[in-house]
Amino acid sequence: MKRILSIAIAIILQSFILHHQSSISAQGPTDPRDVALRKLIQSTMMINQFYVDTVNIGRQVEDAITGMLSKLDPHSTYTNAKDTKKMNEPLKGNFDGIGVQFNMLDDTLVVIQPVAKGPSEKVGILAGDRIVSVNDTAIAGVKMSREDIMGRLRGPRGTIVQLGVIRRGINGVLPFTVKRDKIPVTSVDAAFLIRPGIGFIRFSNFSATTHDEIIEAINKLKKQGMTSLILDLQGNGGGYLGAAAEIASEFIQKGEMIVYTRGRGGINMGEYRSSGGGLFTKDRLLVLVDEQSASAAEILAGAIQDHDRGTIIGRRTFGKGLVQRPIELDDGSMIRLTIARYYTPSGRCIQKPYEKGDSKSYARDVIERYNRGELTNADSIHFPDSLRYKTLKEGRTVYGGGGIMPDIFVPLDTTRFTKLYRELTARSYINNANLHYMDGHRKQLQKNYKDFKSFNAKFTMPEEVLDEVLEKAAAKDSLRARDDEELQKTKQNMRLILKGLVARDLWDLSEYFQIIYEEDPVVIKALEVLAAEDPSAKKK
């Protein structure tokens, strides 16, 4: 069978060469593009037909594509069908599955929350349940990867999956029959009033549904009395350009430029302007960014800054300003080919400098920023006159050269988390402590705290939970505090994050961020800026 397939591929490649020979002859035998194409096809055919060992022609072609793209910019990439599907799911806004948020505890899947009105909630699966089998195949205690487990739980909409569930306080394995359905994937992680009158919206990417989610969040906060808004783009890696333009239209006036693109030779590849009718075009707006804010996040921040619509707070953004065109291939794989560059309304190119074919140096850019002191000291950042631009209304100086430089710089606090805390987090001690704690105390917590307000005011993670984590880490991995100062600060770090995780498990991510952002330096600076303008904003 393999021999027949190889012959068939060889015939197809040979026919392709013959088809192009007339074109090559007409344009001249030395036309570089045609000669190169013929050379590639001939090489592929000869390797497949004559190489001494069996060749995986599909793998050879994929390697060739990857090799060609690696010599271009850092954002022109190839992904196989499996990786393409996985990468696109968060941007599509949904996937097919059973609808649970879960985590792994001692090689067992523990349900954190069933998705509201999703398939699992409908059949009675609860937070804290352990899913131990899928279609009579054990997934607990068998060292199965998270990816393999997700693959078994997910499947086409309408298909049936049989789950075996262990529930605390009930003997035996409970059987559940779940009909898979479309499961929404949301972008907005949090939307709440962080202070009276001050709304806070955090979202993680720019997907097909993000604009609708932002509209819903703004309307909800307006009803609660929002007059100022903090928009959190820290760690937001971007997404769809169209989503960025739609969201920007909610903040700036109709007809104003949001972003434009230039392709090969400076050709205009298109522009996006505000469509008008924005929900929040006049009241105070602050935008939080950091070195991981990229692409569509930079487009939004750049448009708001250039039109003097709001204040950008944080650190210089990533600097991803190259436009990729997705090219779907027949087998479901995809090439994302760079075709243009983004420019902010004032004319700044968002893309940071790079050398073609040198992806390693590009990937190390954020580390180099840290080594140069840029992340901790604004005075270490210098821009030549050629990179100075003016905002469009107030004529303030802003800078090009890659990324968006904030109006107010907030240094990276390298002392905020101790080395011990980072080690505990990396080795899942803190996450596992939360899972164990919730497993034993969920019902009591739900009884004691009927709403988040009372929880936030009264709950403190018990000291014995912190001590148990530290004892386990010391016994298993020899992780210990160097002195009492590090010990106490590590406990402070743990106390905050564990309280946030418990709140997340009882309610949602929005409650998690309400807790942890009380100690976030960039958020604190934003609140200080608003308080300086309005003394009433100081009140919690």
Image: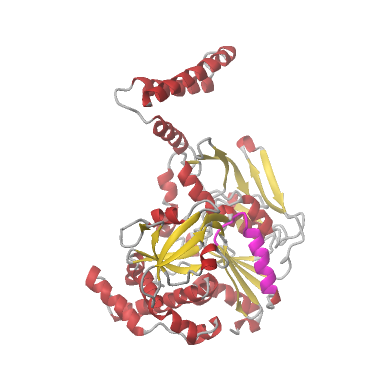
Q: Is 209 part of what is drawn in magenta?
A: yes
Q: Residue at 64%, 44% (x, y): give it.
A: 261
Would you say residue 2 is visible in this rendering?
yes
Instruction: Give the quarter of the figure containing the C terminus.
Output: bottom right
Locate residue 368, reporting x and y percent: 41, 54
Between residue 398 and residue 298, name the one nearer to us. Answer: 298
The way the protein has been coloured in the rendering is secondary structure
Q: Residue at 66%, 61% (x, y): give it.
A: 212
Left or right: residue 319 versus residue 276 is left
Residue 296 occupies which quadrant of the picture?
bottom right
Would you say residue 295 is visible in this rendering?
no
Between residue 330 and residue 244, name the one nearer to us. Answer: 330
Q: Is 408 part of what is drawn in magenta?
A: no
Between residue 396 and residue 154, name the one nearer to us. Answer: 154
Q: Which residues are magenta?
A: 204-222
Residue 152 occupies which quadrant of the picture?
bottom left
Residue 165 occupies which quadrant of the picture?
bottom left
